[in-house]
Amino acid sequence: MRFQTFVAALVLIVLLAVWLNGGASEDRLAPAPATAEADLSCRVAYVHDGDSLRCQDGARIRLHAVAAREKDETCSPGHPCPAASAVSATRMLKRLTEGRDLACRTTGRSYDRVTAICWTPEGTEVNCAMIRSGTTVIWPRYNRETPICA
């Protein structure tokens, strides 16, 4: 009985690890957006936090419809607040994007940043990957306007 419990626990741990790393989810297999759909190219120079980054050309991008904790681990009043830490969200966004070329579709502006939905060269929708990682949450107000994970 102990051996069966051990094996079951091991299987659950492996499945959880695959799920946390994105597995072979649909967003990883989806093709990158058509050239007409992507209106911004970004070579990621720096990840600021879990939902914003800076391109080598100086452009600042905020991920559309994604909410992450601030660097000081707080959430602004009226903003969705994920359970995950700011550090974990920043680490995940770095893993997905830092030093990479992204194809992005602009959805608006937020302060002095462009808001956008971005894809890696392999076709991973970065916004959706951040939500699925559990380190950020969907911001329903903006997701209703232009849905991510589509």
Image (tube, helix red, strand yellow):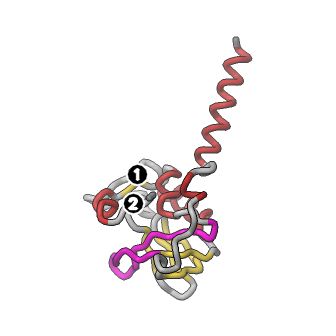
Check disc 1 and report its element: helix, strand or loop: loop
**For mark 2, does the 10 Å Cα neighbourhood hold few (<14), some (14 to 19), or many (20 or more) residues?**
many
Residue 16 in magenta?
A: no
Which residue is the extreme one toward the top?
A: 1
For mark 2, what is the residue?
67
Answer above or below: position of 98 versus 83. Answer: below
What secondary structure predominates along the stretch shown in magenta?
Answer: strand
Q: Where is residue 11 in the image (x, y as percent from the top left)?
A: 67, 31
Marks counted in the figure total: 2
Q: Where is residue 24 in the image (x, y as percent from the top left)?
A: 62, 50
Identity, as a three-letter code, of the amino acid under mark 1: Pro
Question: In this view of the protein, which residue sits in the foreground, 80 or 146?
Answer: 146
For mark 1, what is the residue?
82
Quadrant holding the C terminus: bottom left
Residue 94 in sight from this viewpoint: no
Is disc 1 in contact with disc 2, using a CB cutoff of under 8 Å? Answer: yes
Rendered residue at 61%/76% (across/down):
101
Q: Give the range drawn in magenta.
A: 105-122
- Distance in Å between CA atoms under marks 1 and 2: 7 Å
Question: In this view of the protein, which residue sits in the foreground, 25 or 78?
Answer: 25
Identity, as a three-letter code, of the amino acid under mark 2: Ala
Check disc 2 and report its element: helix, strand or loop: strand
Residue 46 in sight from this viewpoint: yes
Determine which quarter of the picture holds residue 61.
bottom left
Rendered residue at 50%/74% (across/down):
53
Answer above or below: position of 20 versus 76. Answer: above
Left or right of 133 on screen, residue 75: left
